[in-house]
Amino acid sequence: MTIRILVVDDSPFMRKSLQKMLEEAPDLRVVATARDGVDALEKIEEHNPDIVTLDIEMPRMDGLTCLKKIMADHPMPVLMVSSLTQEGAQATLDALSLGALDFIPKESGFASMSILQIQQDLQEKVRRLATSPRFHKAPPASAKPPQTPAAPTGVRPVALPRTPAPPPPSDSRLASSPQAELLVIGTSTGGPKALQDILPTLPASLPVPCLIVQHMPSTFTRPFADRLNGLCQVHVKEAEQDEPLKAGTVYIAPGGIHMTYGARGGRGHIELSPEPVSSLHRPSVDVLFLSVSELFRGQVLAGILTGMGSDGAKGMEQLKQKGAYTLAEAEESCAVYGMPRAAVERGCVDVVAPLADIPGHLRRHFGI
């Protein structure tokens, strides 16, 4: 299957660079490029791409305005091309809350020696996002396809090669006794929007601390935590070295460094470290989960939300072996069903639930 891409950027250099990086993969084809939001909307009508890469700062119509119109009129996967500056971080977070699935860095990133890694990341994100379950729902197994299927307006049907997934766990509710004393969550692609949907539903009376690893650059995590704090009743902050864990507080792992659970003097606290440097992600969900498994002596509730790859599955398996309650987001609501699927395939998930049902599971478990 060839994935058809629209590249939108006001810079001719960036349009050409993105097109070249994408089309070096045989399954990716740039069907058109656009210089601004107005041009992009016209090209979407004309070419009906599978996915759009979208710049933020553009003349005539900026990326955020264009994104709103795409989501209203032609819902489809959108990958933002974002600056890693503080201003770029804020705009990118706005885009993710408006429906963009993920982002890649631009400017200094494209001029660095890591261009091959950026190209690989770009290609892989485009592949995964173009077939996102959020935009391409799989029909029920018992449903017979119509003789002449019609695509929804503005959405081009995409053939999804699929391997049978293991059946979800039979339990439909998380156990509530004993009640967990620590909540840990891991997520990646699609996570900012998922967390923005879940955390504001939790009351200030949440009786436990919550540790979250969201794969995100270091310039993004503090603005992200601040944004969530403005939306939530619980206190949300970027985690800091050695701070004690408090009930009703959500700690977001800083980008570029691992967050782990530390125990000293009978109290839990945050520890931040670059080790292990060999980890594919930093921060890593596995690193957090494994530290909790090794050092936390109470009951744990662990969740894995939408994300590419398998980070967190190994750690969740070890937590489950120690008696933790476990929860994973269902495929139907994921931006990318990678991390939750990896955990389900390890057989370590108690409950699989769509994003809209997860707040209810948490509130019932904690009695809030």
Image (tube, grey):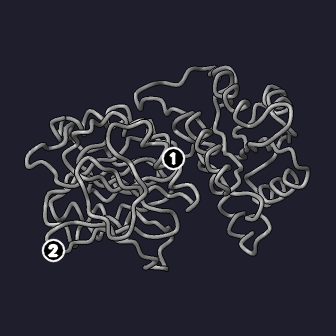
Q: Residues within 10 Å of mark 2 (few under 14, many from 20)?
A: few
Which of these two is toward me, 68 or 306?
68
Select label 1 or label 2 by which is in front: 2
The answer to whether 168 appears left or right of 196 in the picture is left
Tag 2, which secondary structure?
A: loop
Which of these two is toward me, 204 or 82?
204
Identify the residue shown where x is 67% and y is 49%.
87
Q: Position of residue 208 (x, y in %)?
A: 21, 50
Q: Quadrant of residue 141?
A: top left
Which of these two is toward me, 266 or 177?
266
Q: Position of residue 176 (x, y in %)?
A: 12, 43
Which of these two is toward me, 169 or 235?
235
Q: Give me the C-alpha separation between circle 1 and circle 2.
A: 40 Å
Q: Residue extending furthest right? A: 12
Q: Earlier in the sequence, mark 1 or mark 2?
A: 2
Question: Relative to residue 347, is residue 157 depicted above or below?
Answer: above
Q: Quadrant of residue 8?
A: top right
- Residue holding disc 1: 336
Question: Relative to residue 58, is residue 104 depicted above or below?
Answer: below
Q: Which mark is residue 323?
A: none
Residue type, mark 1 in image: Val
Q: Position of residue 88 (x, y in %)?
A: 67, 50
The answer to whether 146 appears left or right of 306 in the picture is right
Identify the residue shown where x is 45% and y is 47%.
306
Identify the residue shown where x is 56% and y is 46%.
161
Q: Quadrant of residue 123?
A: bottom right
Residue type, mark 2 in image: Gly
Q: Position of residue 209 (x, y in %)?
A: 25, 53
The answer to whether 363 appears left or right of 19 in the picture is left
- Residue holding disc 2: 265
